[in-house]
Each structure stands twice: as structure tokens, then as C-alpha cells.
Amino acid sequence: MMNSTALASLSRAARVRLLSGRGLWHTAAVPELGVESIMLSDGPHGLRKQENAGDHLGIAPSVPATCYPPAATLACSWDVELLAEVGAAIGREARQQGISVVLGPGLNIKRHPNCGRNFEYFSEDPLLAGELAAAMVRGIQAQGVAACLKHYAVNNQESHRLVVDAVVDERSLREIYLRGFEIAVARSNPWTVMAAYNRVNGEYCTDSPRLLTTILRDEWGFTGLVMSDWTATNDRVAGVRAGMDLEMPSSGGAFDAAVLAALASGELCDEQVNACGQRVLDLVARTKRGRDEVVALPEEAAFYHAVARRAAAESAVLLTNDGTLPLQASASIAVIGAFAETPRYQGAGSSQVNPTRLDTALDALRARLGAEVKLDYRCGYDPVLSPVDEAEIAAAVAAAGVAETVLLFAGLPAAYESEGFDREHMRLPEQQERLIAAVCAANPRTVVVLANGAPVEMPWVDAPAAILEAYLGGQATGAAVVDVLFGDVEPSGRLAETFPVCQADVPSDPYFPGEPRQVQYREGLFVGYRYYDSAGVAVRFPFGHGLGYTSFAYGALRLAAESIALGEDVEVRVAITNTGVRAGAEVVQVYVRRPGTRIVRPEKELRGFAKVRLAAGESTEVAVSLGGRAFAHYDVARRGWEVEAGAFEILVGSSAESIHATATIVVGVAAAAEEVAGEVAGPDPWAPDDDRFAARLGRPIPAPDPAHPFHRNSTFGDLGATRAGRRLQAIILRAARSQTAKMADGNLALQKMFDRATLEAPLRSAAQVSGGKISLAMVDAVIDMLNGDWGRALRRVATRTRRESR
Ligand code: BGC
């Protein structure tokens, strides 16, 4: 690492310049110190290196790279080794492409299945998300390439992500929304973290000393660099003070004057600027090995493609099966569904990879079945939007009726889920629902294969003979699905999120996505299975669920001790036997429950897991270690993790609903009499009224901050509130539309993302994306004019003209 004297030798202006990137994807070089500029690139499941025209929305083309399955899919593997392997492959490709920082993984909690970006996130559970993210980070960084945990923090929706304030109570923040990041920091030492777009409890993440320094660095020991999400910087002076080291991308120096002025006035001191700058230099130094060392083979695309294929196959979740799978030889197969030919394999937005190749299920099936088997393909629906089309259904039914077996490929069209907007509902397109019903009626030996980045409602769940949830499988998805359908690979994926029966059952549904400027996290701790379990609400498929082609038996549970002291670890051991005739893998899940708790807490929580592979008839003893935190809750009053001493139940199972072995352990006997602090258990803690929610927040429920009179964080959409605003808005929207329509080129998801991005962008972003052409002072002047304060506007313009003519 470069010593801090070197940095101190630079002028103030040079040090301030270092705190912003160069262009969209680079850090600034410091020629005086011989420090090179390094390249950052998306994204979580493959690289999106843009060489020429760039953007942060996944529009302009990028250099071909392997498209691995996105996080939502990989998470279903529950396999830390696999995640590390994918991370290593991405890291290696990054080195080959000269990239020093991979912008991922993303590990935000799936608070609601309709978050448009859930495909980029791992789980509704922070332990699972944190462990998997950590494994991926370890894999990437072992290559000498930095990973970037994102989006820190509480970025659980796309709607109004640039201005929305997530109002969340401290305990839920700590136990649910920060916990995954905390685990990942502790277990993988990430070199960078990305501060999210949104606000948390009134403060922009990019301005927050509490999130970026007190919690991240002081409490968790993070030693790396914090960068902003792209254009997420709100107030650069506040950001420097908070420890937000690097503004990305470059805003053309939009904030430099303010930082220099703050230094001059003493509002900021040189040490604060230097601390941020030093972390930029340290990052360049840390990633040097990745740039300098010659990459060892294998470098061929085929190697990476094979990793992607295995990852997709190992992550697919067999939801139901009446024995039709694995497929046996059959004389005729009808393949229905456009996704068999035009796969849906990744989500839209900044994570979109330009794949090196793309396997379709149709090709893979033809190759697997050979010429003797009659394969009849019908598209069944239009893959872009799936409008209702009776003729396609009739054609599919006719083909299904005469085939021995039907493989029906369904799922969400790309325009349904994307970065930049949330899903409107949890259903499949009506055409596909009708198609499934009609085809299953025509042929009960129908296997449905789903391609989607998040749960869908399945009112048709009982109709197919089997359902394989392939999620979004990356570029090898077609071949991977066929591997699983035929049993060449055992299905060993388990859901990393609950599939509720319907959207109305989702605990955050009444509060999601909230108002444009505020979202209340009233359901508190009760996210995903923590709610369904506690409230006794039946689900379609529980968290952790997944079938295989073999079966497993669980023996009794053995604990290393019957009682432990507070903070002590305990090892949980359970014997597992593969009782079937095929090799397979089981995901052993360890939950902890506190019977008779006096405080609000979920019925049970995942505290450990292990994936074990066993040959037919083989047995083994699986050991999972539970650390002291496994029994702790966050005590808001004491500002720390505490244990409600007494008896805890350890439950070992194959899903949140299928528990096969339990045991009791007493934790902290000596302290048992101590009072436990926290919200006392009461009715429906997932739906508090205003008073109870305010009590949980420890303050009155804040009113959403007004967008008018306009200010820097009013959005272009908000301009509609006044006549003058509407005029300007119309001009801007027209200009944006004509630009973006060309770029989107008929791609509906992209166009929708553009439209939303334009309307939901704060006014300050006009300066941030202008490359220095529009200053923040100009934005402020326009805001004054729109607010009718012409005097102030003119004064600003005059000051600026004076300064420029000097
Ligand atoms: C996304 C980030 C991404 C960045 C750069 C933003 O829009 O939220 O996840 O890394 O763009 O493309």
C-alpha cells in the first residue's frame, strides 16, 4: 500500500480529483505519484465491460463474457464452494479483460417478490445471502480482483430508488437488512462496498457516517473502499465526512468546487479528504497482482461455459414431481414454449452480460434425444410480451395431445422484471397460464420448466406432472435444464426464498413499494419464511424446499453440549442417509427457535446449513457449527447483540416446513434471570398500527419529505406539480425519449427502464451526468426559477458569470 505522505504531497485540487472516477468505469490516475487508473465493471454474474459508449443501465454493447446464472439462481444451490468457483471464474475473466473491480455481488434482502431486481439478489434470509456473497467475494478476490458488496443498504425495491427513504426500525435493520453485509464483511474481507441510491431513515446512504463509518468500519472492521452507486452521490461534502471514498462515475467535477470550498471554510479537513483518497490508492495497490500476474490456463470460453452450465444445473429446483422425471426414453416429445428456443436467461439492466454463446433447450434436447425420437416444437406464446393468442394455444394442445411426454417452457418475459422498475404483479402472463392449463389437460404427462428471476403465483400448480424451477440460468441454461430433466445431473437446488400462494400473502405487500418518497418497513423482522412461519400462513413452496431423484433419511440430532455459556459456539451433528438408488445431494438446514420468548421474534430462524453429496445407500454425519450470534437478537436499548438466556430449540430440516430432528440447548443459564429488553411479544407484530410502529422506530413516523417547492432531490416526475415545471418536464421527457428510443431499439424492458429512470431521477442528476457541461449552480438556478424565485436565480447566474470571467 502507498504511504500517506505521498498523498499529502499532492495539491488539494489533485486530492479532491482523486475522490471521483474518470468517466464511467475508471478511477482517476495520479501521474505525480505514478498511480494508474483502474477499471471497474459490472457485474454480479458476469462481466459487462464497455469499451466505447458506456452507460449504467445495460444498453450499449459490452465485450462478450460468460453469463453465469444470476444470484437468485445461484442461491438455490446453497453451495458455498460453487459460489466461490463462479466467483473465481468471473475474477479470472476480469483479469483477462483488464478489469480490477467487479461490481458485485448484490446481496440485498428480497423483501417482496416483486422487486424488479430480485434476480440479482440471493435470498430473503440474511445468513444465506451473507454466506453466499462471502463465498463469491473470496472467489473473485483470490484472483487479485476486487469484489464489491452492493447495494449498501436497504435497497429492496426499484421504484423511486433514487429518492425513496426506507423507514426501518433499528432491530430489523440490524437483524435483517444489515446482517448479510455484516456476515459478508467478516467472512470475505471485501475490498469495496457500494453505497446504495436510496435513503435510510432520512439520510442518503452516500451521506451516512453511521452506515459508512460507524457500522461498516468501526463495528464490522471493514478496511476497504466505499464507492457510490452510479450517480448516487447526493452531497459530496457530507459523503467525504461519512467515509464515502469514491464518487462513481465521474460527474465531471460537479462537486469538486463544493468540496474545495468546504476545505477552505474548515467544514471539512484535509485528513478527511486524505482518508478517502488513501483508500482509492490502496485499492489500486490491492488489485495490482490481478493486473500484473500472467493468468494461468484454462482461459478458453469452453471452460467458463462449463462452469456456467454446472452452476445452472446445480441450482435448478425441482418443485414437484409425480415420478415423470427423470425423463425416460420416450417415442415422442412435444416441446412447447418460446423460451425453449429463445431462452430467458438473465435480467435486464446494469448486470446484463453479452454472452459468449447461448444454449437453447430445444437444441440441447435435439442433441440429447437423437433422430429416433419424434420432437414436435410449438412456441405457444410470443416470448416478448405473451399477449393472449388462442391459435397458439390450440396448436400447442394439438401437439401435446399426440405426444408421449410434453415439456412446457414458461416464465416471465424480460419486460416483466428488470432493474429500474418493480413487477406489477406476481402472475405469469395470462397467455402462459392458459397455455399451461390447456396443455396439462390435453396431456397429464406435462413437465413445466420455469424461467423467471423471482417467485410467481401458480394457481395451476397441481396440473403438471412435474415443475422444474430453473430461475434464470445464464448462457448455458438450455443445456443445464436438459441435464436435470434427464437426470444427468441430480436436482439439488433448494429455494432460497418462499413461494407464497399469492401476492396478498406477502407480509410487506401493504407497504410495498410505498410512496414515491417514502417506504415504511412495517413488517419489521417478518420477512419471507420468518412471517409465514410465525403467522401460520400456508405457502405454495416453503423456503428451503426442493426435491431430488433420490431420498434422504435424517438420524437423531446430536449436540456437542446440552448447555453453553453466552457467546459460546455449539456443534450440531446429524446423520444423513441417502435411502434411494441414485446419488444425490441434500441441503441440511439448521433453524433456531426460542420457545416462550418474551420479546417479539420470528418463530424460527436459519442459523446454519450444509450441502452434502451422497452415493446411493451412503450415510454420513453432517456437522454444522452455530456461533454465539445464532442465539442472539439485536437489543436496541443496549445497542448490541444480546441473548435471551434460557432454552433454545435446534431444528434440523430440509425446508422451513420439513423439520426432521430437534434438540434443546440451554444458553447462558447463569444469566437466565436477567430481564430481556425489547418489544414485548404481542398480536400481529408484522402489521403494527401507527403507534406501535412509531414505538418501534423510537420516534414519530416521519412525513415523506415534500418534493415541492422544488429542490435538488425533487425528481423530473415531480416537476408535473406546477405549470412551469410541466413545461420543462415536457421538453426534457421529449428529448430523453428521442434519445432513449434509439438506444432501446424496440426493447421494451429497456424502454420502460429508461422512462422510469428519467421520471424518477433527481434534478441534481442533470449536473451529475452532464460530464461537466451543467453545473450544480445551474441546476440550482433552474430550481429557483421553477419555484418562482427569479431574484435568487439571477444572483446565482451573476455570481457564476463573475467567477467564470475572472
Ligand atoms: C446499478 C449498480 C451498477 C451500476 C453500474 C447502477 O445503476 O445500481 O448495481 O453496478 O449501475 O452499472
Image: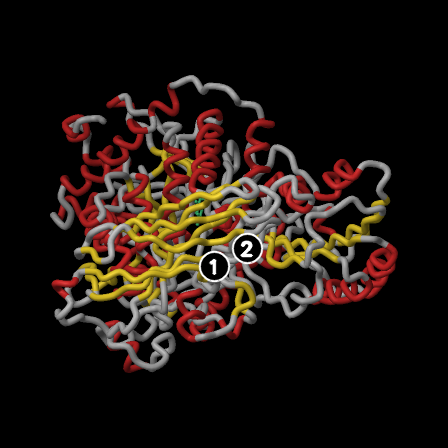
Using the image as rendered, state which of residue 252 and residue 359 is in the foreground: 359
Task: Give the residue at x 64% y 44%.
Answer: 484
Using the rendered image of the protein, determine whether residue 719 is visible from the camera's viewpoint. Answer: yes
Residue 474 horizontal/vertical position (percent): 58, 42
Placement of the C terminus among the 4 image quadrants: top left
Circle 1: element type: loop
Q: Which residue is mark 2?
A: 546
Residue 355: which numbered mark, if any?
Answer: none
> Which element is circle 2 on?
loop
Residue appearing at x 39%, y 23% in the figure: 291
The image position of residue 697, as x and y in percent, is 26, 72
Residues at circles 2 and 1 in contact by the CB criterion of under 8 Å = yes
Q: Which residue is mark 1?
A: 655
Above or below — where is 135 with respect to 379? above
Residue 272 x, y percent position in the rendering: 17, 43
Residue type marked 1: Ser
Task: Left or right? Give the position of 134 relative to 315.
Answer: left
Q: Which mark is first along the chain, 1 or 2? A: 2
Alpha carbons under labels 2 and 1: distance apart: 8 Å
